Image (cartoon, rainbow, N blue to C red):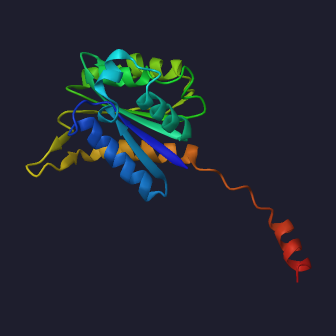
């Protein structure tokens, strides 16, 4: 079972990507295989020109198709998610997120941008067929910082919310074991001797 993490920040050292990396490590600890994809994995010309027929777009669509779930992280600029992320999402098929569990993650300068998840990102995800969009995780710039060594520091409450979101995603994605009929199991054991 593969989970795709999609980084929508143009910066390699972004706060939203730090949250995404934390989520990915937690998923790996829960036994999931994760694959990361970001803006830097798609040529800028393909994004700007919307090269839907290009090799990078085909690879993107294949990776999304193969994933059971998608975590999408973005910075919020001017009350909306990143334009680079929108360019990536525009390269997907119209219903690329059908059957996928999606966890949106965002960071912004202040709590005032929290609703960007609800009013700008979630409608685009719904247009791509996502019907199971989990409650998003939002953090301000003060809640995700970098120290002198370049290590991300995530506020404890944000980390707890993110861990809860990741755990919810894992519950929805992990195949549930069929219920075991203990009486039937005992009969099978008795007659198999």
The residue at 49%/58% (across/down) is 31
Q: Is residue 105 above or below residue 146?
A: above
- Where does the image place residue 124, in percent across and percent down from the top left? 45, 19
Relative placement, left or right, of 192 versus 129 is right
The residue positioned farthest toward the left in the image shown:
148
The residue at 30%/42% (across/down) is 19
- Where does the image place residue 94, in percent across and percent down from the top left? 54, 19
Q: Is residue 158 above or below residue 56?
A: below
Q: Nearer the viewer, residue 100 or 48?
A: 48
The residue positioned farthest toward the right in the image shown:
191
- Where does the image place residue 66, in percent across and percent down from the top left? 55, 40
Q: Nearer the viewer, residue 98 or 180?
A: 98
Q: The C terminus appears in which quarter of the rendering?
A: bottom right
Residue 115 quadrant:
top left
Q: Is residue 147 above or below residue 107?
A: below
Q: Nearer the viewer, residue 4 or 57?
A: 57
Relative placement, left or right, of 140 versus 169 is left
Residue 39: in sight, yes or no? yes
Residue 115: in sight, yes or no? no
Q: Is residue 121 above or below residue 176?
A: above
The residue at 35%/16% (across/down) is 49
- Where does the image place residue 23, in percent across and percent down from the top left? 37, 46
**Figure disc tally:** 0
Residue 75 quadrant:
top left
The residue positioned farthest toward the bottom in the image shown:
193
């Amino acid at each position: 079972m593969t989970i795709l993490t999609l980084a929508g920040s143009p910066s390699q050292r972004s706060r939203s990507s730090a949250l995404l990396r934390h989520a990915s490590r937690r998923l790996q600890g829960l036994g999931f295989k994760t694959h990361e994809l970001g803006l830097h994995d798609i040529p800028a010309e393909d994004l700007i020109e919307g090269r839907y027929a290009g090799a990078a777009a085909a690879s993107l669509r294949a990776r999304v198709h193969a994933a059971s779930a998608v975590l999408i992280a973005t910075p919020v600029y001017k009350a909306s998610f990143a334009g680079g992320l929108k360019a990536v999402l525009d390269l997907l098929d119209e219903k690329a997120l059908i059957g996928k569990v999606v966890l949106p993650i965002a960071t912004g300068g202040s709590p005032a941008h929290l609703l960007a998840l609800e009013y700008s990102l979630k409608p685009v995800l719904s247009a791509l067929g996502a019907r199971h969009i989990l409650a998003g995780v939002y953090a301000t710039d003060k809640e995700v910082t970098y120290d002198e060594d370049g290590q991300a520091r995530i506020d404890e409450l944000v980390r707890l919310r993110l861990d809860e979101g990741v755990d919810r995603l894992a519950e929805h994605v992990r195949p549930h074991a069929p219920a075991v009929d203990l009486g039937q199991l005992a009969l099978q054991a008795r007659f198999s001797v």
